[in-house]
Amino acid sequence: MKLFTQYANRAHDFLWGGDLGAVSGMHRRRVLSLRTFYAIARDLGEGQLTLRAMSLVYTSLLSLVPLIALSFSVLKGFGVHNQVRPLLLALLAPLGDKGVQMTDEVIGFVNNIKVGVLGALGLGLLIYTVITLLQKIELAFNFVWRVKRARPLSQRFSQYLSVLMIGPVLIFSAVGVTAAFFGSKMVQSLIAIEPLGGLVEIVATLLPFMLVIAAFTFVYMLMPNTRVRLGSALVGASIAGILWQTLGWGFAAFIAASNKYTAIYAGFAIVILFMIWLYLNWLIVLIGASLSFYHQNPAQLASPRRELRLSNRVKEKIALLAATFIGRHYYTSAPAWSLEALAGRMNVTPMSVEGVMNAMQGAGFITETADDPPRYLPARSFETITVKELLDAVRSAGEESGLGAESLPHEPGVESVFEQLDTAADVSLHARNLRELALAGIKPVDSHATAR
């Protein structure tokens, strides 16, 4: 036991000890890779990623037929709807013969859907089921990226429809262009010439990986309600794409040796294996999203995933810093701050800042623009808002209507302490307003006497 503790302490010192900025690039990348592996293992051990993958499996089972039906209707307008079955067969190829059976069943369900028979209500439910799947995916990605705020309803609806309408066209266009490229006479003639033939074969082998990685990169950048850098999305997509393809080979070998499951579960075996395959795929997608998050936010590698509980002192400082930065950019005509930019400026996660920003917005001190992502501006002149008002708003934020300070028992000694605290704060801060705080040591370019 003592030997194990010694090795554990050494491993901890190697991972988290020392300043990475003072070491060589190769050693730094190696330590960061090990830290990322540890963070992913830690997140999996907490169970939230696996739980959300299971939730997505359930929603996918409900939404699979409606999703393919909508994609089928869109592709029919482009005359490529006959390619739905081959693509579905390719996705379910690791299931072997059961994948062919599952594909035929799903296509059969899709062919049985008739809009005229469904009516307006049935069509609405069909679309709602697909929208629900996309919303679940967004919530899962927001959880990975530690983002509490979902997209506004109007923005969510427009982006989801874009995915449903444009996504299938792009997928089948890529598949079609690839097939046409490798089937062209010029490429066929190049294959017969060495070493060009070997090079073409290598490209053909790597192409499925590249298409999967491109698709994952697109999803990782689009679905979270935050700004994801291309490089971070590409890192997560690359690892997830390799895991995806490797899983396909491994699962195919598992299916080949799964006769015992067919003997036990009979006709249900195909459903059970399909659910396992869906679960593993969704888990890989979420692991790739986690990799993207940690690549973009390496400071969060050591932070366990849990509900952040900031102290009142930290909340107050975040509020004062946010008011300072927002006011300074406003009064100096600099670009307005977004939530992610503010969090980066304070070297914390957006989740740490979001609650405080909501409190400031609820008190009427700041407002959001209609930009994507939204940016913050003063809701009224910062000259009319005192520092004491800001601190009071942050302290009282989140109080339930039935459990506020006023609803607690009144004791003379306790009430006198609160009165003395409020009086002392009023006396020391009564002359300090947010504009003065923002422009401390800064000469404004444009005074903005009133907020826009």
Image (cartoon, helix red, strand yellow):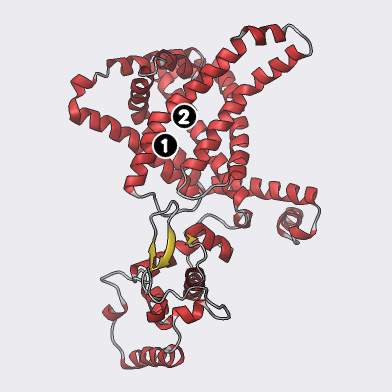
> Relative to 236, is 113 above or below?
above
- Counting residues from the start of the chain, the first of labels 2 and 1 encountered is 1
Q: Quadrant of residue 405?
A: bottom left
Amino acid type of disc 2?
Answer: Leu
Query: Which picture quadrant has residue 57?
Result: top left
Amino acid type of the residue tagged 1 in the rendering? Leu
> Looking at the image, which residue is at 62% across and 30% down?
242
| Residue drawn where x is 47% and y is 14% of the image | 86
Q: Which residue is mark 1?
A: 56
Q: Is residue 291 above or below residue 89?
A: below
**How many numbered marks have been drawn onto this rendered protein structure?**
2
Question: Image point 48% across, 18% down: which residue?
Answer: 87
Q: Are marks 2 and 1 in contact (CB under 8 Å)?
A: yes
Q: Is residue 388 left or right of residue 240?
A: left
Residue 58 visible: no
The picture places residue 10, in percent across and down from the top left corner, at 76, 56
Residue for badge 2: 278
Kindly identify which numbered label has been placed on residue 169.
none
Tell me if residue 293 can be seen. yes
Residue 67 placed where, x, y %?
36, 27
Q: How far across and down, in percent of the image, does residue 209 sit? A: 61, 26
Identify whether 209 is placed above or below 185.
below
Give the SS element for disc 2.
Answer: helix
Residue most extreme to the right: 24
